[in-house]
Image (tube, rainbow, N blue to C red):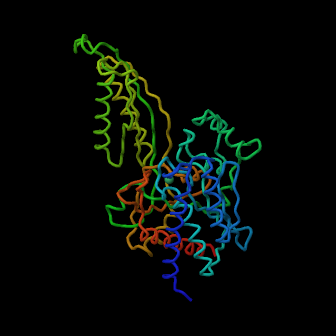
Amino acid sequence: MRSPKTTIAAATALLARRLDELGRVTDEPGRLTRTFLSQAMEQANLVVGDWMKEAGMSVREDDTGNLIGRLEPKNAAAKTLLLGSHLDTVRNAGRFDGALGVVLPIVALAELKRRDVELPFAVEVLGFSEEEAVRFAGAYIGSKAYTGTLRAADLKLRDGRGNTLREVIEAHAGRPFVLPRAAHARKNLLGYVEVHIEQGPVLEDKGLAVGVVSAIASQTRGRITFRGKAGHAGTTPMSLRRDALAGAAEFVLAVEAFGRATRNLVATVGTAQVPGGAANVIPGEAIVSLDVRHPDDATCARAVKDLVQHAQTIARRRKLGFVWEQTMSHAATPCDAELNRALAASVRAVQGPCPVLVSGAGHDAVVVSRIAPVAMLFVRCREGLSHHPDEFASPKDLGVALEVVVDLLQRLAAEHA
Ligand SMILES: [Zn+2]
């Protein structure tokens, strides 16, 4: 019989191969793009569904294109452990973001099957159909549908062709769409574990392959409009100007300074527009975005309030009109202490040190936390790069992550035996 070490090496090679294969399933020739209910998403579900079947799972797809593989336990009354992530991508994506969290658990379950380990609970591996908000501007369609938190308002969202989310879902499912209830009641779930590339530089900085996530940061996004007065750039004296862009520029630098001065806070102005702008016109209007994140809800909310107030002060001093519109806000999602204890024990068993990170990016785990305790394992990615074709996690790191999940499943099996 082969030792676990040699089988984990073979399983790691299989995982890397499958991520390459899935990375070639795309809507756009020459680059990786898979968006909600597209042809490539259907193809991805077929490919990954076959891997699920090979690992002994029954496979189904719900009306919103979520791929669900299920492994039944001997005891039909046992609870269910969820593992997964999303199969959609941004445009011109890398092959690890999302896909890793779906393919890795499948390989881990196949590895346990090879070792004749039987789990005393059911397992569902989830390939969510939408997380990246590319086709529709609202993210998490897949996990919202799965957790019964998709709302009627979501169905009115329109894609670039003007089709509503409801129309797109109904065309795909071939029947009228009814807002789904949660796939499981909380009391029937052991938890949800999501493996994801870090999308940041912390693990690389620490020289470690994997880390455990303590919380997914609270996040607020919005838009600030400064309104001044457009005027001729040659004939309006400096003292008589109300330059909206100059006000916005002052705000951009204030946001950066504020972020630097507050521990664990990240604050970003990522877009700036000057509608009707021209080289010889004093900007009459400037619109900037604001994105603020912090692991603690109250600190995040206070930061947003302070920054908006600061923008208002700038506007008042410069005699500019001012409008703040909040476009998105979600509370921090703490990861489950008990699941994290088991996950950290597995990380220590495989890797030694167990770094704990805050996730500054949102993940499906945020939505799934509404029906289950959640935990996340982050995997180092080169230069923290994601949402880019050069996104890369080394086979060695994939092996560590795989071993951690195999260990975690066995650990949970022993706890729930
Ligand atoms: Zn992702």
Q: Is residue 229 above or below residue 338?
A: above
Q: Is residue 123 left or right of residue 15?
A: right
Q: Position of residue 397 (x, y in %)?
A: 42, 68
Relative depth, front residue between 267 and 94: 94
Quadrant that contains the C terminus: bottom right
Q: Where is residue 246 shown, x and y percent of the image?
A: 29, 25
Q: Is residue 128 above or below residue 259?
A: below
Residue extending farthest to the left is: 238
Q: Residue at x 22, y 15 (%)?
A: 238
Report whether 7 appears left or right of 37: left
Of 19 and 345, the residue lying toward us: 19
Residue 152 placement, left or right of 271: right
In this view, the residue farthest toward the right is 175
Quick one: which residue is furthest to the front in this view? 29
Please report the residue visible at 70 percent of the width from the left and 71 percent of the height from the top. 73
Relative to 51, 99 lies left or right: left
Q: Is residue 228 positioned above or below 71 on the image?
A: above
Q: Is residue 322 above or below residue 58?
A: above
Q: Position of residue 348 (x, y in %)?
A: 43, 72
